[in-house]
Image (cartoon, rainbow, N blue to C red):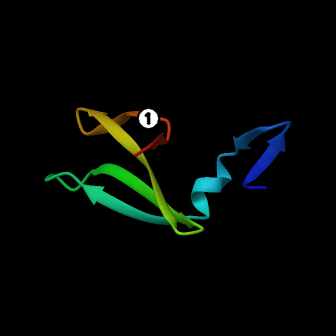
Amino acid sequence: MAFEQIGTQLNITEDFYDRLQQTIDYNGDGTVNTITATGTFGSTSVSWIRTFSYTSGKVTGISEWVKQ
């Protein structure tokens, strides 16, 4: 399930982002910089971004999805 309704609050689950169109942006060294997930809801386009951090060429952090 991509989301669930809890009372009047919408709880977005992790697989929600997997169902959206995603664009990958790369750093100059070929590592992933960001992944942007974009969806259209009615006539509104909404994007969320996830950023990757590296130490010595290895992934050391992945941000939460942040609405743009």
Choose top left, top right, bottom left or bottom right for residue 6: top right
Image-based side of 57 in relation to 11, left or right: left
Label 1, secondary structure: give it.
Answer: loop
Reading the image, the residue beneath label 1 is 63
Direction front: furthest residue: 43
Coordinates of residue 40 in the picture (x, y in percent):
54, 67
Q: Residue at x 40, y 46 (%)?
A: 68
- Front residue of 66/15: it is 66
Query: Which quadrant of the figure contains the N terminus?
Result: bottom right
Q: Residue at x 39, y 53 (%)?
A: 35
Indicate the amino acid at tag 1.
Answer: Ser
Q: Badge 1 local density, few (<14 within 10 Å), some, or many (20+)?
A: few
- Front residue of 7/31: it is 7
Coordinates of residue 61 in the picture (x, y in percent):
40, 32
Direction right: furthest residue: 7
Coordinates of residue 20 in the picture (x, y in percent):
55, 64
